[in-house]
Image (cartoon, helix red, strand yellow):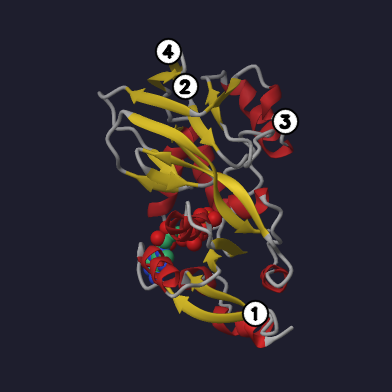
Amino acid sequence: MQGNDRRRVWFVVNPLAGKRTNIDLAQLIRDHASPTHLAYEIHFSQYAGHSSLLAQEALAAGVEAVIAVGGDGTINEVASQLVGSSVALGIVPFGSGNGLARHLHIPLEPVRALQNLAVYSPYTIDTATLNGRPFFCTAGVGFDAHVGALFARSVRRGFRSYVTTTLQEYFKYESHRYRLCWDDQSLALEAFTITFANAGQYGNNAWIAPKADIADGVLDLCVLRPFPHYVMPVLGTQLFRRTLDQSPYLDIHPVKKVVLECDTSVPTPLHIDGEPLALEGPFTIAIRPGSLRVLC
Ligand SMILES: Nc1ncnc2c1ncn2[C@@H]1O[C@H](COP(=O)(O)OP(=O)(O)OP(=O)(O)O)[C@@H](O)[C@H]1O
């Protein structure tokens, strides 16, 4: 391969991802990203939100792909800048959940993910927005957003402490009332959690929308209605066995655009790609079919 044929890419790295595991991410990239196939620069984000600016700079520099090294939050910041462009997103998973990478079958082992960048070609996927804010994996309100907000404030990380927080909060949590409007439907309901799924899982192989197709031009609107406590272990098992769509408590609707209104008497925890967000409703959630190229 000639030097000029090499794919020009920028790595945008969340350094906190590496610190959590004491891995020198820059060295890892230098050791395993093929110099024969990639002409690359490595850039570290210095604060939350910085990855978006770095992705903008990468676009201005005329790269072919921006490789996000981190979790779904970092991917969100990078990919938000690439939507609608011909510049592809690459992913080296280094988060705690890695929902998008898992959905796209990108290896979770960073060395393999780096090596594979040399052979991947771009695959076009859908993206979505919530009140204009892009998301790629899932967004939603309710219990998972509530736990996500607590977890973000917690110093303890990892799947085990996420499960502990989930169980502690489950017995205290009260379902809220919502109104959902799409096409000619208007639904007033009480829900434990409402998820807008572009990819099928939250991360950690927790599949809220087992049959979600990331390139079908629709979102899976998942409404998990309140359920008796004794059903909780069954739902938990189905979530991780990718069979939650068999539960009588979960309704899934394919939607292109939906408006969500929340009970304004209580604060509504909200998440976008697992990151908690303080936004005022009502919320408009819409799909952007075929709007992002991903190396996978
Ligand atoms: N240098 C930095 N200092 C502080 N925060 C940062 C920095 N770089 C990135 N971030 C923020 O960290 C947040 C979380 O990072 P990331 O998504 O990579 O990991 P994660 O939350 O562990 O993974 P996942 O979303 O898969 O669970 C991102 O939303 C990003 O804004």
- In terms of image quadrants, where is residue 34? bottom right
Q: Secondary structure at mark 2?
A: strand
Q: Nearer the viewer, residue 240 or 9?
A: 9
Q: Can you give x and y, in whole percent of width and height, for residue 68 in the image?
A: 53, 65
Residue 13 horizontal/vertical position (percent): 49, 72
* Front position among marks 2 and 1: 1
Q: Earlier in the sequence, mark 2 or mark 1?
A: 1
Q: For mark 4, does the 10 Å Cα neighbourhood hold few (<14), some (14 to 19), or many (20 or more) residues?
A: few
Is label 3 in a helix, a strand or a loop? loop
How far is mark 4 from mark 1, CA to CA?
A: 52 Å
Residue linked to disc 4: 186
Question: Relative to residue 224, is residue 272 depicted above or below?
Answer: below
Q: In the figure, residue 236 lies in which quadrant? A: top right
Q: State if disc 1 and disc 4 touch (CB < 8 Å).
A: no
Between marks 4 and 2, how big is the CA–CA gap? Answer: 15 Å
* Observer-nearest of 181 and 243: 181
SS state under label 4: strand
Q: Which residue is mark 2?
A: 191
Q: CA distance from mark 2 to mark 3?
A: 19 Å
**Which residue in the protein does label 3 denote?**
243
Q: Badge 1: how crowded within 10 Å, few (<14), some, or many (20+)?
A: some
Q: Is residue 36 visible?
A: yes
Q: Which of the two residues, 3 or 260, is positioned nearer the viewer here?
A: 3
Q: Quadrant of the C terminus?
A: bottom right
The residue beneath circle 1 is: 6
**Contact (CB < 8 A) between labels 4 and 3?**
no
Amino acid type, label 1: Arg
User: Does mark 1 have its CB less than 8 Å from ligand 1?
Assistant: no
Name the quadrant where ligand 1 sits: bottom left
Q: Amino acid at mark 4?
A: Ser
Give the x, y percent position of residue 212: 65, 35
Position above or below: 159 against 61: above
